[in-house]
Image: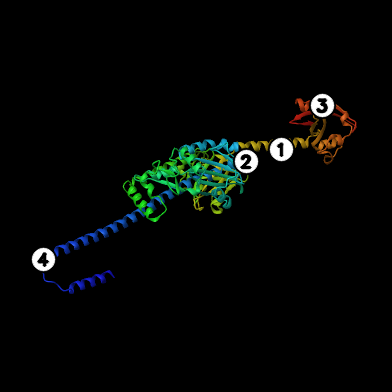
Amino acid sequence: MILLLIGIVVAIAANRRVKSSAAPVQQRLLAPMMAIVLLLTSGAAGIAWYQHQQKITDAFTTLISEVRRDLHNTLNLQAQGLAATTQTIAATPTVQQALRDKDSRKLLACWQSVFETLRRENNLSHFYFFDINRICLLRIHKPEKYGDLINRFTALKAERTGKTASGIELGPLNTFTLRVVQPVFENGKLVGYVELGKEIEDILQTAHNRPGLELAVMVHKDQLQQQTWQESMRLYGREANWNRLPNSAIIYASQGHLPDVFTPFIVCNPAAGILSALLGFIFVLLRRTDAGIYVQQAEIQEKKESLSATLRSISDGVIACDALGNVVSLNVAAETLTGWSTDAAMGRSIAEIFQIINTETRQEDKIQVSRALRENRIIAHVDHTVLVAHDGMEYHISSTCAPIHDTSGDVIGAVLVFRNITDEYQQRKHLRESEEKHRLLFEQSVSAIAIHEVVLDTEGKPVDYIFLSVNPAFKTQTGLQTADITGKRVTEVLPGIEKTPLFEIYGKVVITGESTSFEHYSEQLGRHYFINAYQMGEEVLND
């Protein structure tokens, strides 16, 4: 269309009648030639300006996408690190038991030092435990506050899905917090939740470490309360000017405050938005370099190493595997119990590193890792499991395996947590053997044996005793049937016995703990007996 219009103009000008003129050619052509040059220059400048603006727009769009992608990737990495930590905590048997028993003191004693390490080295700011009803049992970062209902969307999502949930939420102090909530299961039953959180300011500061990049975070005033916002800004030493912007309030600025040059452009209309974007692009472009990317990557790696060091210091053995069941890392306790170093075990199958057998059959036992990965749930081995170390040593263990999820909920590996219970197992074994010996002695003794519980009145005086258990010889020597006397008071079984000195004698044995021997004639049974009485806790043994 433009070419057609130009053609028409040229044709008209070419056929126009030419007037005779004595004016020099220079005078006649100078003005038109200058107009043509000016037109061409203006056109070229306009085209160059348009192309330049287009390049600026494209570059600015690319920059915004890169910054958004970098922040998103950093948040995902942080969320994955927190998720791995919460899943490790949730797989710990002591946590499962404490949540089941609602034992906040035990949780605080076990995890306060770990929280201090994570807060110091990873900027962790929140550490919660709450029960199956989302009632807060313990805030390790603020132990004095508990008993409230947690209604944040991450907790609700974890409750609804039964899986790890993460997200960014605006907290009571008007700061954005990255939170990860992990359900805790014991033998497949929900016993509570663990939540870790950290304010995202260190992530924003990481992005700000790029030369030439300054960040500001604003929230619409409809989502804030003026007094609370002003108090929180003063608490963090930031500018608390509520009226500086018409519709939004600044909750974070990498320079401490938003430069005044940008204030007029933060309004809700397209022209101002474009101009603000262009100024922001120029401001960022002049200072942005690739060195910022390397600084960010180094900081992320440092945080990973710090988190790894914290996990390695846990007293329980911890082995992390990938989605194929190959070993990724072991902590110090796992290296000690398995006899494998992390370098030697890395990349090998978990079945080669973690060899377990059944205590009773001595047959190879199945490792929970494959099942946890396949069924996407926590699998526990509590008893009858022996770990055979690389050097041939054997340890009785209890173990739990939990799948590891990424922020999308996909299984990317598993963490195996196990504990050496050899001493506990031996104690239980000796206790069972001792109980069996006493049971045989009790049942096969030719002497009559009865276990009584002495009944005291309100003044501490013995007034009766109850038959708890008797051996077969007791039936033979007294003629009393076991079913007729067990659980009954002696005054019901043998009326009139309260007139004998037995109550006083047995009460003294219980109260003083001193054993005694004496002869006694039972009028009710018509027999003479020689009796030995001993204290058994709050009971009396007679034979």
Q: Amino acid at mark 3?
A: Ile
Looking at the rendered structure, the kind of residue marked 4 is Val
Residue 234: x percent and y percent?
46, 38
Identify the disc placed on residue 340. none
Residue 25: assigned label: 4
In this rendering, position of residue 302 left or right of residue 171: left
Nearest to viewer (mark 2 / mark 3)? 2
Q: Which one is in front, 330 or 138?
A: 138
Among numbered discs 1 and 3, the one appearing first in the sequence: 1
**Quadrant in which the N terminus appears:** bottom left
Q: Amino acid at mark 1?
A: Glu
SS type, badge 4:
helix
Quadrant of residue 142 within the rendered picture: top right
Earlier-in-chain disc, 4 versus 1: 4
| Crowding near the residue tagged with mark 3, few <14, some 14–19, many ≥20 C-alpha atoms within 10 Å | some
Q: What numbered label is drawn on residue 436?
A: 1
- Marks 2 and 3, the one that precedes in the sequence: 2
